[in-house]
Image: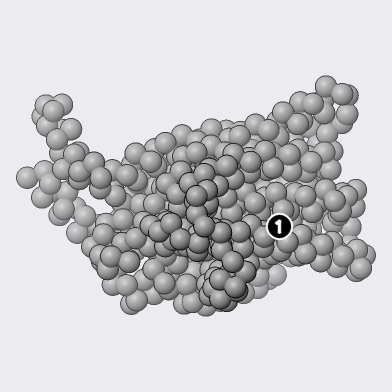
């Protein structure tokens, strides 16, 4: 077979230059490069902190980070996810709705996380908890608002077709800025403590938010007429209703990823939290291609649904799943062989998390193989049923953690995550088939995809 023949068949499979598949591969590849750099920086950050601070202090830092992430997400009322939907809906007009919505989203992103973080701080202090010992209230509040702002602006930039730029800001520049902060700490002769690490993360978040905000202002708000207070009040109930329904899904993801950390910290020790967090950091590598591709193309589900193009929905789904699954399987096999070595980079104590690493990596591969059903349903007006499924899965995750952590510790937390993902993704796949007529599990689609591939070759 000639080189020209191979390229020709690839072009046939990918479609023309404007096709969704070419877009996902092209934009996803650029986005992936940012995420690869981001993964290197995040792993380097975690290795540095665990090596210098030790498992106990690193566990304290992770514990506070998880609590503030959770409270900031609740305070944001789902505005980041809803922003993807409303930008795609309003971008085609020059009306006031875009500016009115974004000003509302920004306001809630500042006020909501501040109030919820303050509430968590007060509750912990009232009941004699030690989670925030050594941390200042102002530092925790500024970190919570900063991370919420980065999340909102990242979703907005993706919807504006600036996914690569947002990935570099969120994944790369944010962490580089944190490293710069730590370098300054070392230059003045200060020690690295959990409080200093949180300050560095806060510094990185705010520096990442500034360029993201500039793009959103330039592409979505500048030149649009300002909304009056009456106009905002008229649409505010609609915006809030949709955003709060959409909030359930990211809230479930936080429950899935952070509840285990919070319960480990409450039941066991900070060192156990550190071991589990490192295993989770490594396990997420199986999903970084999926995160890049879905982040790039999620808003296109909304466009296809508005056009009532069921075939395009299915093709988008298949493309996202296949692009992400192969590297995920390679990653899983790599962890199986090299897992203990990778964990030991964070410190000799971290090798104890090997079983947890494999359980979490298996959950990640299964998640990818079942397709991005959550994003599909959220972008096609099915957020209510997604919310119901996610609430059930979140309750199941909390119960499983409560039952398994006391006896199995961090391995119990990982097992709880795996069991929850199995039931959660299966339920969403069934909903997607019943509501939209699309098949999300790649194994069920494989015969059709193979026949399409043979047809393209012929």
**Residue 339 locus on image (x, y percent):** 56, 40
Picture quarter with the C terminus: top left
Q: Is residue 367 left or right of residue 64?
A: left
Expressed as whole percent of the image width and height from the top left, the position of residue 152 reads 59, 54
Q: Quadrant of residue 266?
A: bottom right
Q: Which residue appears at 52% of the width and 48% of the height?
A: 222
Say left or right for 375 vs 321.
right
Image quadrant of residue 263?
A: bottom right
Rendered residue at 48%/46% (across/down): 219
For the residue pair 289 and 210, the one nearer the viewer reads as: 210
Residue 133 at x, y = what percent?
A: 90, 52
Q: Which residue is mark 1?
A: 110
Q: Nearer the viewer, residue 444 or 298?
A: 298
Residue at horizontal 68 percent and vertical 33 percent from the top: 177
Q: Residue furthest left?
A: 458
Q: x, y percentage for residue 384?
A: 49, 77
Q: Label 1's element?
A: helix
Q: How many marks?
A: 1
Task: Give above or below for 422 relative to 322.
Answer: below
Horizontal side of residue 199 vs 324, given as left or right: right
Outermost top residue: 187
Quarter of the figure with the N terminus: top left
Residue at (31, 55) in percent of width and height: 316
Q: Label 1 neighbourhood size at 10 Å, few (<14), some (14-19), many (20+)?
A: some
């Amino acid at each position: 077979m000639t080189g020209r023949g191979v390229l020709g068949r690839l072009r046939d499979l990918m479609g023309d230059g404007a096709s969704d598949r070419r877009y996902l591969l092209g934009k996803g590849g650029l986005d992936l490069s940012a995420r690869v750099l981001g993964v290197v920086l995040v792993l380097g950050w975690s290795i540095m902190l665990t090596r210098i601070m030790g498992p106990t202090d690193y566990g304290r830092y992770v514990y506070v980070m998880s609590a503030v992430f959770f409270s900031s997400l609740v305070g944001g009322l789902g505005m980041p996810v809803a922003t993807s939907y409303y930008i795609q809906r309003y971008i085609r007009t020059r009306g006031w709705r875009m500016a009115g919505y974004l000003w509302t989203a920004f306001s809630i992103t500042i006020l909501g996380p501040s109030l919820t973080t303050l509430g968590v701080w007060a509750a912990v202090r009232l009941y004699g908890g030690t989670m925030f010992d050594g941390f200042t209230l102002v530092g925790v509040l500024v970190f919570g608002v900063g991370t919420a702002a980065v999340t909102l602006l990242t979703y907005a930039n993706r919807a504006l077709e600036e996914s690569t730029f947002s990935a570099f800001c969120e994944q790369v520049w944010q962490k580089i800025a944190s490293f710069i902060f730590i370098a300054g700490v070392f230059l003045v002769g200060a020690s690295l403590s959990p409080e200093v690490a949180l300050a560095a993360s806060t510094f990185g978040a705010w520096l990442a938010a500034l360029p993201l905000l500039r793009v959103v202002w330039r592409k979505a708000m500048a030149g649009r007429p300002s909304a009056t207070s009456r106009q905002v009040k008229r649409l505010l109930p609609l915006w809030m209703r949709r955003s709060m329904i959409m909030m359930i899904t990211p809230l479930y993801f936080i429950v899935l990823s952070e509840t285990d950390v919070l319960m480990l910290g409450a039941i066991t020790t900070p060192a156990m939290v550190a071991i589990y967090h490192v295993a989770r950091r490594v396990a997420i590598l199986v999903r970084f291609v999926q995160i890049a591709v879905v982040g790039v193309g999620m808003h296109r589900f909304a466009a296809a649904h508005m056009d009532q193009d069921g075939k395009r929905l299915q093709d988008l789904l298949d493309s996202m799943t296949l692009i992400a699954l192969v590297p995920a399987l390679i990653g899983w096999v790599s962890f199986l062989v090299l897992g203990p070595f990778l964990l030991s980079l964070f410190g000799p104590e971290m090798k104890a998390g090997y079983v947890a690493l494999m359980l979490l990596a298996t959950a990640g591969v299964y998640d990818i193989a079942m397709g991005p059903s959550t994003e599909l349903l959220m972008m096609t007006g099915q957020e209510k049923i997604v919310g119901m499924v996610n609430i059930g899965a979140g309750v199941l995750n909390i119960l499983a953690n409560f039952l398994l952590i006391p006896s199995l510790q961090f391995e119990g937390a990982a097992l709880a995550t795996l069991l929850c993902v199995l039931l959660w993704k299966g339920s969403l796949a069934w909903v997607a088939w019943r509501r939209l007529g699309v098949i999300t599990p790649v194994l069920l689609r494989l015969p059709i995809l193979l026949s399409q591939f043979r047809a393209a070759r012929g």
